[in-house]
Image: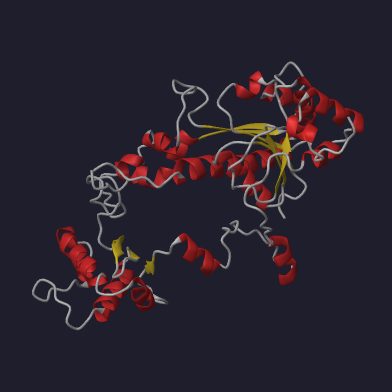
Amino acid sequence: MALTGFKVIEFAGLAPGPFAGLILADNGASVIRIDRPNTLSTDVLTRGKRSLAINSKVPSGRDFLRTLIASADVLIDPFRPGVMEKLGLGPDVFLGDGKTKGLNEKLVYARIAGFPRTGPRKDMAGHDLNYIALTGALAMMPPGPSGAPTFPMNILADFAGGGLMCAAGILLALIERGRSGRGQVVNADMARARYVSTFPLLHSILPTSHILGKGKPGTNTLDGGAPFYNTYECKCGGFMTVGCLEPQFFKAFIEGFSAALPKNFEFENGWRPTPDLQANKSEWPRMRAYFAKGFLTDTREYWGKVFHGTDACAVPVLTPKEAAAAQGSPFPEFHPRVIRQDMDQSSQASQQSTSFGNIILEPGLHTEAVLRETGLSDKEIRQLLLDGALGEEARKSARVNVKL
């Protein structure tokens, strides 16, 4: 796999940091998550990773982390600005500062913050919803019943603007390192989810664009204003999506939908939408009402069958359980797949196989293995235990197998 042989140190965090590490692990990197001793974890983005529990505030624990990071290709820092520097593990320690040589000048030091690391909000706390509020994108979301914009859970800032962009930055830095031999600092912040919102934001300033932005939210093509780009409730509670933006797809939808309605279906004295009405915004409210009433005549399963295999761009809304059954696994597979054309199918399948173990990675599960891989002797591991760097649980249990 593309990242086989690369060593990644990921300090335990929430959502975006673990997602960046997951992308690297799914593509072959060896990812070690650094947990605090005697803690519990709710992180579910742990596939293919191992956990080392060590206290970075204990001098011997901090010294070991310096040694570990000095042998790594990538470090993922999920903390607020200044935390790693206070621990003595900031970028200058490893990459140098222009005057002093660093411990690992080939390291890609990736940092994910909420707000930019410089500026008036750098020390503020926040979450996905706060970050996208500052991008301009939240204001363009379809309005809810109260008129306030709805929001896409924590997908846009945490995962698209944070973890995914951080992983992209890491890959770019590794490419640059291949040319220059020098490590890089990758700065990603979730308030810059504005970047992944480039398409709608640019359309919002174009004087002739009707896609997003000229009308108030909920009246434009992609924000719930268009009846042919929307979600509709069906009989018995399921939902169908309609996304037939192009005229030929709209025509396929209109013809298939009207033909599948009950023969006794009635709407405004027999009115029916026709393909030529798509761009007529004055007809959108009536068209939406027609679609809404029509979908309620039958179940989601019925409508799914009507449009299956057509170009109508109409598909059912699956629940997480249904989507998992359709995929054959409750675990989302990693994507994109990167394959070699000169490999046979069995070799490709082996290269792309995804191992799914327990969803939650127990903190410290691989502590001894990581310590020994780094070359520590029994005496050195014993000292870490006595110092409390590995936590009280490691001292009491047989997880770290040395005599005290």
Say how the picture is coloured: secondary structure
Task: Answer left or right for 231 relative to 192.
Answer: left
Residue nearest the viewer, comparing 132 with 339:
132
Q: Position of residue 276 (x, y in %)?
A: 21, 69
Residue 109 shows up from this direction = yes
Task: Answer left or right for 385 relative to 96.
Answer: right
Task: Answer left or right for 401 relative to 342.
Answer: right
Report the residue at 79% width, 32% height from top: 395
Q: Is residue 241 above or below residue 256?
A: above
Q: Is residue 354 above or below residue 367?
A: below
Task: Answer left or right for 80 relative to 288.
Answer: right
Q: Is residue 126 above or below residue 296?
A: above
Identify the residue at the far bottom of this view.
263
Q: Position of residue 296 (x, y in %)?
A: 25, 70
Q: Quadrant of residue 176?
A: top right
Q: Quadrant of residue 292?
A: bottom left
Residue nearest the viewer, comparing 14 with 76:
14
Q: Is residue 139 above or below residue 311?
A: above
Residue 71 shows up from this direction = no
Identify the residue at the far left of this view.
269
Residue nearest the viewer, comparing 305 with 283:
305
Image quadrant in which the C terminus is located = top right
Report the residue at 49% width, 22% height from top: 123
Q: Position of residue 175 (x, y in %)?
A: 68, 42
Image quadrant in which the N terminus is located = bottom right
